[in-house]
Image: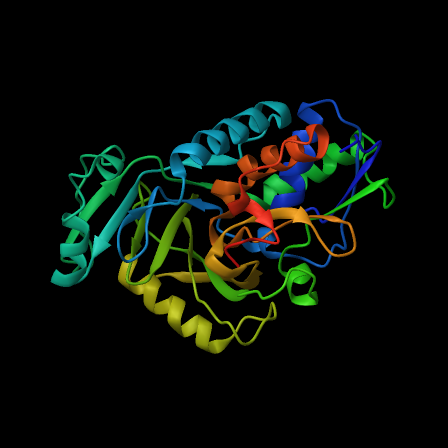
């Protein structure tokens, strides 16, 4: 395929930053540029949850991507001398017999039981709860800011290169070039409260993440129609209900933010070459913290060594 002398990464969100560090690890010179207009990573919760969804199933290909993600974030912490990955067990709560039946029916499956802990704390009137190990959250803002500073120190910030790699997130999907998308706006609250900080809590269609110092992040909403980064009263009402259910009614709202998740059909990340000949890396969606490091490694192998990944990761995708 031919080695690009100086790849240019367009977009310093989760995808572009992970790819940049993958090049750094391999000693590859590159440039990176960013519009500075925001992006979902700057407001994302950075949550990793091994067993997800209403049906209580392991995250897609977690056995492959989880160790890559955790290894990458721990490596980067050493590289930056900063704490960015915060492991915390998850308390998955069920509010009805129907919901609990879906959870309890899968507790003995090997792919689920390997993540189970011993905790079973119940809170705020939930029917049942189960503890999951392996969870945690990435401090996405610190991840971006300290990476940007290091890229600057290494002289990598520029807007020219021999091969363009578009890591433009939701903005790139909405602008077109990768076909149909399912981008969704999400809103998040940061609150201060006197709640327990021992677990991430998931239930009532949302999540609550302790971020230290008596502060918590709570979310999230999905809006497929109004794709902007403006917080809404409807979003505030919904997340307030989640906060009250998972934490309690006594809290102080510190911040209310919104972002747009970059989602392609089937909610799977894709890499490849678009119609203009540019490489693309997009579609990380709401689980980008889990998948970005592994996909970045996969894309670097393809660009640098010509090792094409499995077709399910390749744009244009046969699954689109």
On-image quarter of the N terminus: top right
Query: Is residue 313 rendered to the left or right of residue 104?
Result: right
Q: Residue at 63% x, 31% y: name it.
A: 307
Q: Residue at 50% x, 42% y: name it.
A: 291
* Residue 201 visible in the shown view: yes
**Figure label count:** 0
Q: How is the image coloured?
A: rainbow
Query: Is residue 53 rendered to the left or right of residue 64?
Result: left
Position in image of residue 67 (x %, y %): 44, 29
**Quarter of the view holding residue 213:** top left
Position in image of residue 56 (x %, y %): 26, 51
Image height of 305 relative to 201, above or below: above
Q: Residue at 29% x, 46% y: name it.
A: 196
**Quarter of the view holding residue 61:** top left
Position in image of residue 260 (x %, y %): 57, 63
**Quarter of the view holding residue 113:** top left
Query: Which is more toward the observer, 232 or 104?
Result: 104
* Residue 13 visible in the shown view: no
Query: Which is more toward the observer, 210 or 90?
Result: 90
Position in image of residue 263 (x %, y %): 54, 59
């Amino acid at each position: 395929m031919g080695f690009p002398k100086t790849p240019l990464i367009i977009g310093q969100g989760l995808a572009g930053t992970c790819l940049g560090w993958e090049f750094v690890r391999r000693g590859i010179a590159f440039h990176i540029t960013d519009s500075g207009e925001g992006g979902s990573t700057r407001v994302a919760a950075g949550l990793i949850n091994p067993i997800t969804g209403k049906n209580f199933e392991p995250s897609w290909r977690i056995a492959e991507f989880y160790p890559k993600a955790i290894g990458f974030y721990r490596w980067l912490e050493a590289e930056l001398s900063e704490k960015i990955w915060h492991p915390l067990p998850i308390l998955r709560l069920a509010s009805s017999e129907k919901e609990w039946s879906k959870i309890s029916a899968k507790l003995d499956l090997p792919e689920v039981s390997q993540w189970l802990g011993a905790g079973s704390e119940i809170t705020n009137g939930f029917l049942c709860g189960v503890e999951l190990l392996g969870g945690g959250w990435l401090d996405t803002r610190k991840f971006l800011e300290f990476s940007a500073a290091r890229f600057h120190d290494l002289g990598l910030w520029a807007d020219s290169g021999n091969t363009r790699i578009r890591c433009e997130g939701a903005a790139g999907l909405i602008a077109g070039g990768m076909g149909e998308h399912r981008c969704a706006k999400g809103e998040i609250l940061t609150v201060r409260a006197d709640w327990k900080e021992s677990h991430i809590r998931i239930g009532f269609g949302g999540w609550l993440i302790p971020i230290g110092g008596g502060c918590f992040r709570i979310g999230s909403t999905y809006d497929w129609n109004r794709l902007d980064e403006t917080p809404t009263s409807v979003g505030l009402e919904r997340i307030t209900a989640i906060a009250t259910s998972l934490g309690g009614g006594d809290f102080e709202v510190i911040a209310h933010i919104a972002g747009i998740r970059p989602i392609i059909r089937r909610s799977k990340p894709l890499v490849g070459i678009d119609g203009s000949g540019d490489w693309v890396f997009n579609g990380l969606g709401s689980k980008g913290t889990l998948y970005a490091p592994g996909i970045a490694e996969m894309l670097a192998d393809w660009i640098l060594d010509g090792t094409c990944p499995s077709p399910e990761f390749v744009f244009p995708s046969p699954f689109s």
